[in-house]
Structures are given as structure tokens and as C-alpha cells.
Amino acid sequence: MSINILAIESSCDDTSCAVISDGLLKSNVIASQKVHEAYGGVVPELASRAHQQNIVPVVSEAIRQAGITKDEISAVAFTRGPGLLGSLLVGTSFAKGMAVGLNIPLIDVNHLQAHALSQFIKETEEDEVPEFPYLCLLVSGGNSQIVLVKSPEKMEILGQTIDDAAGEAFDKCAKVMGLPYPGGPHIDRLAAEGDPDKFKFNKPHMPGLDYSFSGLKTSFLYTVRDGLKENPDFIKDNLADLCASLQKTIIDILLNKLKKAIRQTGVKHVTIGGGVSANSGVRSEVEKLCEKEGVKAWIPKRVFTTDNAAMVAIVGYIKYLNKEFCPINLPPFARVTI
Ligand code: KG4
């Protein structure tokens, strides 16, 4: 009999459900929430309500696309945290209901560990996976970390942001330029047309492998404010150059510490994960850096970089094989580390 893991992800503003059968991805359905665009950021209460509306159709569609029936599901995996508590509660409660209703095991998954293991999602038997230990540059809207992944269970954070995450830097600077939320993808698109050396922004001097992005955000804000004093059309006239220069600075900051971590640990494999790893510049520069350092870069498909249930399902599958199930009364956690 096949092992079919159904996984639910609802940590922020994407409702997602995936099915992995015998280690291969069969479906990965994602419903993104447009409702937040008007507010320039995720509104937690609206996110919970949208999850509530989306969850039944998303789960039904994932089961349908996987070509299985409910009775063939071996276990239900769900994101326990970190994330928005109201959002997590929707996915957690739904997963518990399914596990009880179908009388099958329940598996809790750490969202950050799932990002760090997303390279293990296989769509065909031929897909290759990285070798342990490897480094994961985990960069999302809420986190910027360099993680040493020793095994699926053993991970160590070597460095992390002390203030804003890289995604927040993208989003907050995008807001300054009047771009819609989330700003990262817009900056990515506009940066392709701009001059990355036109503007210089402050880079932090952080010790070790930690990051900081709040100074960059302020420096960006001052550049725009000063520019607008001289020219009311400053943003419009320089949009692509502002985006390209900002993106280059964020990438420089991220890669400077990644390079240090590669040299310090001597790992041979590097992966990237989290929404910011969808960025074209991040992807190509990580590849270049890894080539120079003589290590193998694993660049995930874009759909597996932002929030998705496929990464939750693969962790669920690994935990299922190890019989790591959780009790039915396990609460979700808004804040939890890797
Ligand atoms: O991992 P994710 O989907 O959600 C959480 O943080 O939970 O990451 C979202 C972040 C946002 O800050 C968004 O602007 C950023 O990822 N992002 C990007 C790109 N696509 C998404 N940033 C830069 N370039 C992109 N192409």
C-alpha cells in the first residue's frame, strides 16, 4: 500500500494543501489572498477569515489532483508554527479534524524546517537531493537566517537578522516607492531594467554571521526623501535604478555572510529557501558565488520558495517513516525557532 501524506500550510496569507505519495509530489494547491493588497501588508484577522473560506476547496482540490480518495490518506501533516496564530489555528484545527475523522496519525511540522528541507521535494524518481550537511540561506518575509542543516532533525542557526528580515526590507522600501504589497516581486521585475550602481545605500557592519536590514531601510528612505526635495518626480524618474540598486545592496549583504559561512563550515552543498529566494538576482548571484567557492548550489523551483504545503508534506513524509506523530491536543505556536 502507498504512503500518502496530506499536508496543510496556513502560517501566513497562503492557504495550501499538498499530497506526497511514496515520497513523490502528487499535488500542491495554493490559494493566495488578494485581500491584503489594499492594506500594504498582511492583516492577521483578514488572513484567518480567508483561510477559513479557502481551506475546504483547497484540500478537496489537492486530493482530487493527487488522484486518491480520503480513505487512502496515511497521515495528515500541518504547519504548527511559526506564523500568525489565527492563521495557524485554521490549518491546525482542520488537520486535527481530518486525523480524528479518518482515524489516522497527525504530524506537526516546523515551517522553517520545512523551508530548509524543501529541496527534498521530488516530482520524479530522477530528482536529486542535496547531501548533509548543507547550508540553507533561509530568507522570507519574517526570517533571514543561515542554517546549517545536519540532518532532517538536526539544524543549527549560524546567523540571523537582529531586526528586519530581507523580505521586509524589500516590502518596506517598495512601500516608500508606492509599489503594491508584497513589494519584493515588483522590485525584482523593475530591477531588471535599472542600473544597480546608480545609488549607494548603507550596509550594516554586523559581527559574525548575523544580519541587519533596518539601517538599509532608513538609508533608502533618506535617499528618496532628499531626491524628492530636488525633483517631485524623483521616484518616477528613477524607479528602475532605485529598485536595481536596492536589490543589489540586499543581495550583497546576504551573500557576504553566506560566503563566510561556506568558508567557516566547509560544506559542499548550499540551498536557498523562503520567499526572497524567488528573487532573480538572489538566485543567479548564489549560483555564481557557489561556483566560485567550489560548492554545489541547489536553486529550488519558484513555487517551492514561497509558502507552500509541498515542503510541509515532505517533512511529514520523513516524520511518518520515523513514526514521529503528535498528540491531538498539540497547540500551534506563533513563535518557534528551527
Ligand atoms: O516565504 P514567504 O512567501 O512568506 C513568509 O515570509 O511567510 O515570503 C514572502 C516574502 C515577501 O517579503 C515578498 O516580498 C518576498 O518574500 N518575495 C520576494 C520575491 N518574491 C517574494 N522578494 C524579492 N524578490 C522576489 N521575486
Image (cartoon, rainbow, N blue to C red):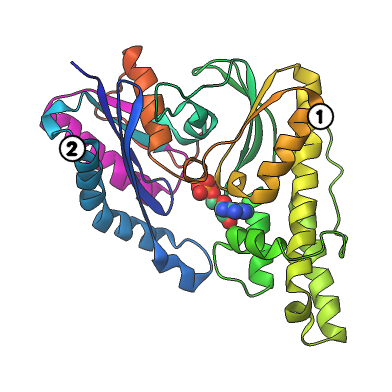
First in sequence, mark 1 or 2: give its number: 2
Residue 148: where, in percent of width, then height?
Answer: 64, 22
- Does 59 sit above or below residue 66? below
Residue 155: where, in percent of width, then height?
Answer: 58, 21
| Element marked by disc 1 | helix
Residue 16: where, in percent of width, then height?
Answer: 34, 46
Q: Which residues are magenta?
A: 81-107
On the image, which quarter does residue 131 sit in? top right
> What's the residue type where badge 2 is placed?
Gly
Quadrant including the N terminus: top left
Question: In this figure, which residue is indicated by the disc labeled 2?
Answer: 97
- Rounded to the nearest angstrom, the CA distance separating label 1 from label 2 is 50 Å
Name the residue located 19 percent from the left edge and 36 percent from the top edge: 67
Q: Judge from the rendering whether residue 135 lies leftward or rightward of residue 68; answer left or right.
A: right
Q: Main secondary structure of the magenta part?
A: helix
Can residue 164 be seen here? no
Question: In this figure, which residue is indicated by the disc labeled 1?
Answer: 292
